[in-house]
Image (spheres, helix red, strand yellow):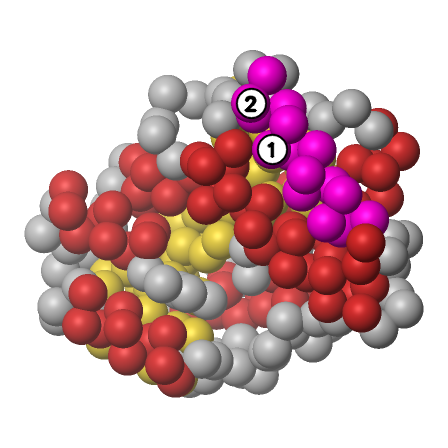
């Protein structure tokens, strides 16, 4: 296992791993805003890039952002609309927790990979998110509410805050061959950067849950938490971190 690699972001690390072997045909499952594919395209003229996402609007933006990318709107909970042994690399980040049967999706990944093809799978472990503020109990309750996500995002069938730490085991119990596990730790010591990366999302999710009487905080406590973040930033005591795990696996000759 490798920890805290030198890549600038988890998407940069994913691109490093994708381009570390044959990558003429690459597909990103749950491409989102296309950050991983953009990193790949910026570094190498990959023969064919494909992006799959259930969100039609997000997918349209990816196709514009990365010219030549083949966009496919599809719910990955269903069988993937590709033939057997189609791709050299399947890459995905923060997507497996959204499906009820990750084992079935891993089987589909194995099916569409060519023999010897690689799966590069990353996932944040959402119970590793931490911040430094004065009120420890409040910090724990806000972050627990976010991790459990009582009000799920659109297109999420389920939620598993432990998917990061479960990822290697799921791959090991699939018909893919686990090759490596890396931990990527994102750290910020100022609030604006952390807010952009994660904390605005945390606040919005906690606020939504609190408004419905869900989670472990009230709406007032969410705002108090935000005040404490600002205070920690102003006094130089602020720190944010979260850990993502990145697994590489290979499709065996016979799946």
Contact (Cβ within 8 Å) of mark 1 with mark 2 = yes
At numbered mark 2, what does the secondary structure look like: helix, strand or loop?
helix
Q: Residue at x 33, y 70 (%)?
A: 51
Which residue lies most toward the top here? Answer: 236
Specify few, some or many for label 2: CA neighbours under 10 Å numbering under 14, 14-19, or 20 or more. few
The relative height of residue 173 versus residue 128 in the rendered view (above or below) is below
Quadrant holding the N terminus: top right
| Front one among 35 and 14 | 35
Rendered location of residue 104, percent (x, y): 65, 70
Q: Residue at x 23, y 48 (%)?
A: 40
Rendered location of residue 183, percent (x, y): 56, 29
Residue that carries the numbered disc 2 in the rendered image: 234
Q: Is residue 139 visible?
A: yes
Rendered location of residue 162, percent (x, y): 75, 47
The relative height of residue 235 versus residue 156 in the rendered view (above or below) is above
Q: How many marks?
A: 2
Residue that carries the numbered disc 1 in the rendered image: 230
């Amino acid at each position: 296992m490798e920890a805290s690699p030198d890549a600038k972001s988890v998407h940069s690390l994913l691109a490093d791993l994708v381009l570390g072997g044959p990558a003429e045909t690459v597909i990103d499952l749950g491409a989102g805003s296309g950050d991983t594919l953009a990193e790949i395209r910026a570094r190498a003229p990959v023969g064919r890039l494909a992006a799959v996402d259930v969100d039609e609007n997000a997918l349209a933006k990816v196709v514009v952002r990365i010219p030549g990318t083949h966009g496919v709107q599809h719910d990955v909970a269903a069988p993937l609309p590709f033939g057997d042994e189609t791709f050299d690399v399947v890459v995905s980040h923060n997507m497996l927790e959204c499906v009820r049967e990750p084992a079935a999706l891993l089987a589909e990944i194995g099916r569409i990979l060519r023999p010897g093809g690689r799966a590069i799978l990353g996932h944040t472990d959402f119970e590793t998110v931490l911040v430094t503020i004065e009120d420890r109990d409040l910090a724990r309750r806000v972050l627990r509410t976010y991790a459990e996500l009582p009000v799920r995002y659109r297109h999420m069938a389920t939620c598993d805050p432990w998917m990061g730490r479960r990822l290697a085991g799921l791959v090991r119990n699939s018909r893919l061959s686990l090759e490596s596990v890396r931990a990527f730790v994102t750290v910020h010591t100022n609030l604006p950067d952390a807010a952009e990366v994660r904390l605005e999302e945390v606040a919005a999710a906690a606020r939504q849950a609190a408004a419905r009487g869900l989670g472990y905080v009230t709406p007032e406590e969410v705002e108090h938490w935000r005040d404490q973040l600002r205070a920690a930033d102003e006094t130089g005591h602020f720190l944010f971190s979260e850990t993502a795990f990145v697994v590489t696996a290979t499709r065996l000759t016979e799946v």
